């Protein structure tokens, strides 16, 4: 995506029609717009957002919803007088030129009482030199296909957005969209699951005919009930995770105060390392407990039956056992065959009037009755002995396995107790020193809350597991009962194929996202190293949140961040995203990939990008941004530009200035 121009007509302080063109030269890909505070830099940035998405974020004390230029409003005031605001954006996306025009008409209801009418949006594109409009009603969908609104804040941003960009809630989805992962994720969401009725699999599952079968209906009710309960539990987990993020942030702030104000830095670092090990040990202990309980649940009953088996075998050691009986055959089975009048081999069975005579087939069957329980218990004894022999082989493995698993549990318990003792000892050493007691008390309170929320989350996880088991069991019952009709069999086949595709997508998506996150972290660290003049490292977690670490005595610790350092970190993150997206767009489809990653390079449009950055960082940032983005548009103050210009001047393809003629009239000078 490349932006060619933006035209503003009576938009806020930009009176009349004013056009701003941007450099698209690959070698001189930077456009600089110079202007001080209140000159209208942020207004132009918001004009992009308003034109594309119909939203603009202005200060509440500046009548944010009124877009018409105030001088125009005064000049044309009068009953039923009309005026119009519009912004036109021309851009190129995937080699297609688009023209996006959003209008906001106003009417004066009574000498200055301007009222906004229904806004209008027009989107057109050029094909073979001919301008064609998109179909009415499709305008916003086309705009979002060019640049989704969820991503726009990463490419049209001001100082406030940059400062908190790495902690936004929608960061994961936005990053996945930028790096081309969203299409695959959307495909997975579309297929869904049997319990999600709005998805493809859910709709097929709901279409299965279970009419007239009470068991199938009960199974459906169980699935619906457990699904609803599972969704409620998942919401509880989300709330708990949100609370844990807040609590951990509070914990880190207090820990930072303790590190900065106590002579206990080494103890604090040691404590952090122990806490990390403690968390790992608790995870391992939980795994060992699950393994122990699972193995014990499946095998213990046979082990505890061993004494009874010994007694039974001793009782039966001298029993007269023969193997003439047919294993698992019963007298009831023989009686049913006689009643049917034909043997399973096809021979006809004829019974005499006295019940004791008949044809040869009947006499043979009567002979078999002598060797079946209860007439002949030898067959049952022989079956029992074979069962005991099989169970003994399994019992021989039980005790060594259960003993080893219990030792593993005890080892982790001992390690956890030792680590907790170390933490308690450190806590006592740093508690109350230099009037820091209140911070220590806050830390203990926060830890208690973290423990409580963690236990709550763990309980919800266990309950979700129970729900899933109930759903799976009910689903098996339901599937077995509805698979009789031809239509149901087709739907079940469709569902089976779709679920296999889901499994493949899940595996491939997880692999690709992990690979992408690793590459992104490497790219961000490389760019951060070029921008930052110190020795720190960036780490990106699974939610794409960014944390800075520093080396201290051979260990990595989380560091505090000044506004300037935070700015550099965020620029490195954004630049890494843009650079990786540009690389993926340039590569196109990789034929070795099993999935096509659909993405496009994007520009960076920045308002006051160097605020709170020192001279060195301004120079470093200026050197990096033109290299990673295919187009850079900067709204810069003169005082910051003096440091950036020597570094970036060779990449600037266009200069513009803002001339503030009055508080309600700014002119763009090219």
Image: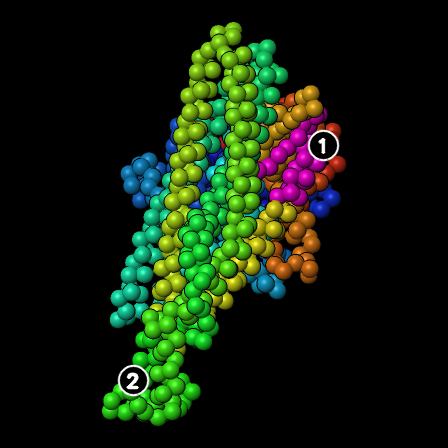
Where residue 368 appears, as percent x and y from the top left, is 39, 80
The magenta segment: 517-545
Quadrant showing the C terminus: top right
Q: What residue is shown with label 1?
A: 530
- What residue sits 39% from the left and 41% below the top? 460
Secondary structure of the residue carrying tag 1 is: helix
**Residue 374 occupies which quadrant of the picture?**
bottom left
- What residue sits 59% from the left and 13% below the top? 264
Residue ranking furthest to the left: 353
Q: Crowding at label 2, few (<14), some or many (≥20) Cα neighbours within 10 Å?
A: few
Where residue 339 appears, as percent x and y from the top left, is 29, 84
For marks 2 and 1, give the CA distance: 92 Å
Residue ranking furthest to the front: 318
Count of labels shown? 2
Q: Is residue 530 magenta?
A: yes
- Residue 315's place in the image compared with 429, above or below, is below
Judge depth for marks 2 and 1 and give the one in front.
Answer: 2
Q: Which mark is residue 182?
A: none
Where residue 542 appears, as percent x and y from the top left, is 55, 41
Q: Crowding at label 1, few (<14), some or many (≥20) Cα neighbours within 10 Å?
A: some
The answer to whether residue 459 is visible is yes
């Amino acid at each position: 995506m490349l932006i060619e121009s933006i035209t503003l007509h009576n938009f806020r302080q930009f009176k009349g029609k004013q056009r701003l063109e941007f450099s698209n030269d690959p070698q001189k890909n930077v456009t600089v717009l110079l202007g001080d505070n209140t000159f209208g830099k942020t207004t132009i940035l918001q004009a992009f957002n308003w034109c594309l998405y119909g939203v603009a974020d202005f200060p509440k004390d500046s009548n944010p919803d009124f877009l018409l230029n105030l001088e125009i409003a005064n000049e044309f005031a009068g009953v039923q007088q009309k005026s119009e605001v519009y912004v036109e954006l021309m851009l190129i996306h995937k080699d297609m030129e688009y023209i996006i025009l959003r209008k906001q008409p106003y009417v004066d209801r009574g000498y200055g009482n301007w009222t906004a009418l229904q806004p209008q949006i027009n989107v057109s594109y050029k094909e073979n030199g001919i301008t064609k409009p998109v179909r009415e009603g499709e305008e916003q969908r086309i705009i979002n296909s060019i640049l989704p609104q969820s991503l726009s804040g990463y490419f049209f941003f001001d100082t406030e957005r940059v400062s908190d960009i790495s902690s936004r809630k929608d960061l994961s989805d936005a990053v996945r969209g930028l790096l081309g992962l969203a299409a695959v994720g959307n495909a997975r969401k579309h297929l869904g699951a049997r319990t999600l009725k709005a998805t493809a699999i859910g709709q097929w599952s709901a279409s299965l005919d279970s009419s007239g079968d009470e068991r199938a209906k009960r199974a459906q009710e169980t699935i619906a009930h457990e699904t609803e309960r599972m969704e409620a539990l998942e919401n509880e987990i989300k709330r708990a995770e949100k609370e844990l993020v807040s609590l951990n942030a509070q914990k880190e702030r207090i820990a930072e105060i303790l590190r900065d104000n106590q002579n206990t830095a080494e103890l604090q670092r040691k404590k952090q390392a122990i806490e990390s090990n403690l968390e790992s040990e608790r995870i391992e202990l939980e795994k060992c407990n699950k393994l122990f309980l699972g193995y014990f649940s499946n095998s213990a009953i046979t082990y505890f039956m061993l004494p009874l088996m010994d007694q039974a075998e001793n009782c039966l050691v001298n029993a007269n056992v023969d193997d003439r009986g047919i294993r698992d055959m019963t007298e009831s089975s023989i009686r049913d065959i006689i009643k049917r009048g034909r043997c399973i081999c096809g021979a006809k069975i004829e019974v005499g009037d006295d019940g004791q005579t008949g044809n040869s087939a009947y006499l043979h069957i009567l002979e078999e009755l002598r060797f079946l329980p209860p007439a002949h218990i030898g067959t049952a004894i022989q079956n029992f002995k074979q069962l005991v022999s099989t169970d003994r082989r399994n019992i021989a493995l039980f005790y060594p396995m259960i003993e080893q698993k219990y030792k593993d549990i005890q080892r982790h318990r001992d390690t956890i107790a030792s680590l907790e003792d170390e933490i308690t000892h450190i806590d006592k050493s740093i508690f109350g020193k230099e009037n820091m007691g209140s911070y220590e008390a806050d830390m203990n309170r926060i830890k208690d809350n973290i423990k409580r929320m963690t236990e709550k989350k763990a309980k919800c996880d266990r309950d979700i597991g129970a729900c899933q088991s109930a759903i799976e069991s009910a689903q098996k019952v339901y599937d077995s009962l509805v698979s009789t009709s031809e239509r149901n069999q087709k739907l079940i086949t469709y569902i089976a194929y779709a679920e296999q595709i889901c499994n493949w997508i899940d595996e491939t998506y997880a692999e690709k996202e992990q690979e992408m996150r690793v590459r992104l972290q490497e790219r961000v660290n490389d760019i951060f190293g070029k921008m930052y003049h110190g020795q720190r490292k960036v780490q990106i977690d699974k939610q794409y949140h960014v944390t800075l670490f520093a080396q201290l005595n051979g260990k990595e610790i989380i560091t505090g961040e000044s506004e300037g350092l935070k700015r550099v970190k965020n620029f490195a993150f954004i630049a890494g995203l843009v650079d990786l997206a540009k690389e993926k767009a340039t590569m196109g489809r990789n034929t070795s990939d099993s999935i096509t990653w659909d993405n496009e390079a994007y520009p960076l449009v920045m308002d006051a990008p160097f605020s709170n950055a020192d001279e060195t960082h301004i120079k470093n940032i200026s050197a990096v941004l033109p290299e990673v983005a295919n187009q850079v548009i900067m709204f810069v103050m003169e005082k910051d530009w003096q440091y950036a210009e020597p570094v970036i001047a060779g990449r600037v393809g266009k200069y513009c200035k803002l001339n503030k003629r009055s508080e309600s009239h700014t002119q763009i000078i090219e």
